[in-house]
Image (spheres, rainbow, N blue to C red):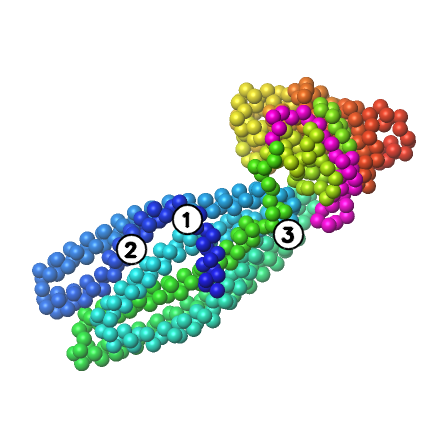
Amino acid sequence: MMQSTLSRFRRLTPFVSPFLPRLLSVFALSLFGTVLGLLSPLFTKILIDDVLLARNLRLLWILSGIMVLATVLGYVLGAVNRYYYTQVTARILFALRAHLFSHLQALSLRFHTRTKVGDLLSRLNTDISEVQSILTDAAFAFVSNVFVLLATVAFLLWLNWQLFLLSLVVLPFQFYGIAKVRPLMVDETRKVRELNASLSSFLVESLSAIKFIKLFTVETLQLSKLRALGEQFVGIVTRFEMLAYLGSTVSTATSFVGGALTTLYGGYLVIQGEMTIGALIAFTSYQSRAFSPLQALMDLYLRIERAGVSLDRIFEFLDVGQEYVEQRGQGQSPAEARGEIEFRQVSFAYDGNRPVLQGVSFRVAARERLTLLGPSGIGKSTITDLLVRLYEPHSGEILVDGVHVRTLALEWLRQHVVVLSHEPVLFHASLAENIRYATPTASEHEVALAAQVVGLHEFVQSLPQQYETLVGERGAQLSAGQKQRIALARAVLRAPKVLVLDESLSGLDVESETAMREALARALPDTTTLVITHRLSSLRETDRVVILDGGRTVWDGRYGELVTSSGDLRAKIEEWEMRQ
């Protein structure tokens, strides 16, 4: 079991090796401080036998000076060691967390839709902190405690080998206790980690839906669910702590018994004149110090096993199958983009469920404005996800500029195809930062111009801090229409060859939507526009209309042709609009 755990920790070598020189320096300081600490019982023996009992005043001054210097030096070394230790451990923790975060960002949307956010946060925080603690502590704790144990054993043998052998009597009981408790603690540790992840998921989900909770007055229901999770948590944590207490009690009790035996026999030796008082006091002091590193090594073993649980949870995400990993840095990156889109008999279903798309085909010419129309849940948004390869179609082909999207570099594809959804993503940052999020190098002037295009500039100018105004978490300080204008300003800055508006104008009234479309057409004259909407009024501003129903393309033509089409089709469209 231990060998298996250590083999897993070897995978973390790349995170530790860059800091190895500093770790060794910290280790050397720690070891030197340990040596100073080991001399204390020896000083006590000399003080009693050679100073106090011998009434040697000169040696008393010398010994006192040495002890003061050793104490001061120990504190200074401890401060320096603590400083560098904190620096190194913090950097290792960040490197490990950044690696996992980067990996999670590289995983496909399919993975993220199947994984709870709270579970991700639990592994990014709790599990990584646990592993980092072992990464930086384990080697130091092991070598330091082994050194202390060996040095202490040497002193004990030198002071009295008979007492030393007597003190070994309790060791089998300590090892037996640890062997019984270890597997139980590992199992409870795993349960604690998993329940922590569930709690995090529940809290993230509830706080994200706070508006819904208030509107439907289900605060009491949510609180009852939290209390139910809390009861589970209390039970598991109680079992874990009782097991930890049991293991600690067995170790402490056996150490106490060992100390009592040596004190009893050592006192007999002093009375018989076979051992000095100073030697007995030094022996009992070293004996307690011998039990301390032994206990520390046993605790370290349990900590490593617990960290192994966290390591398994981290590797579970790092080792996900290749079907969940986006292949970046591969594929073609054409010198220029035209903005042509074509779907050829594309079919798709989410994880084996009922097909969402069945043989969908349509083509969008460069700089053309096409509207996708259909009822909710018919797969319109799925088309945009497939276009930018957030998902892969089960069959059929998707082409951009005549090239299959699977052969295009993801970075190139997403640079030239921008998708704006009906729920704009905003970060807790300034208005300017949010607008330039997809184009970090944009100047203040370019940000202001983009805001003017989408009709946001006048509103920003009315704010006390203007473009430096914080929008609040997820844009809490803004209206739905203002959020959508920020998202549109991002697109204007990016100047893509393909712009997908997935209900991204739904926060605007019909008149404002028409004005926005005209403004975007002027600002992005060379951009192909794909509009997903349920508004019939939006169709007037489009070149062509593609209607989806039942996962299939049921109509493809110009708006004028749709106006004169059969009454049944128009009635169905009006019915869809009324459902929204």
Q: Which residue is mark 2?
A: 31
Of the pair 56 and 178, the residue shown nearer to us: 178
Answer whether residue 565 is magenta in the image: no
* Mark 3: few/some/many CA within 10 Å (<14, 14-19, 20+): some
For the residue pair 23 and 282, the one nearer the viewer reads as: 23
Q: Name the amino acid, label 2.
A: Leu
Amino acid type, callout 3? Gln
Kind of residue at badge 1: Val
Q: Evaluate whether residue 513 shows in this view.
A: no
Mark positioned earlier in the residue sequence (2 or 1): 1
Give the SS element for disc 3.
Answer: helix
How many tags in the picture? 3
Q: Nearer the viewer, residue 466 or 446?
A: 446
Residue at 18% over, 81% down? 272
Q: Which residue is mark 1?
A: 16
Q: Percent x, y for residue 401?
A: 69, 28
Q: Is residue 69 above or below residue 241?
A: above
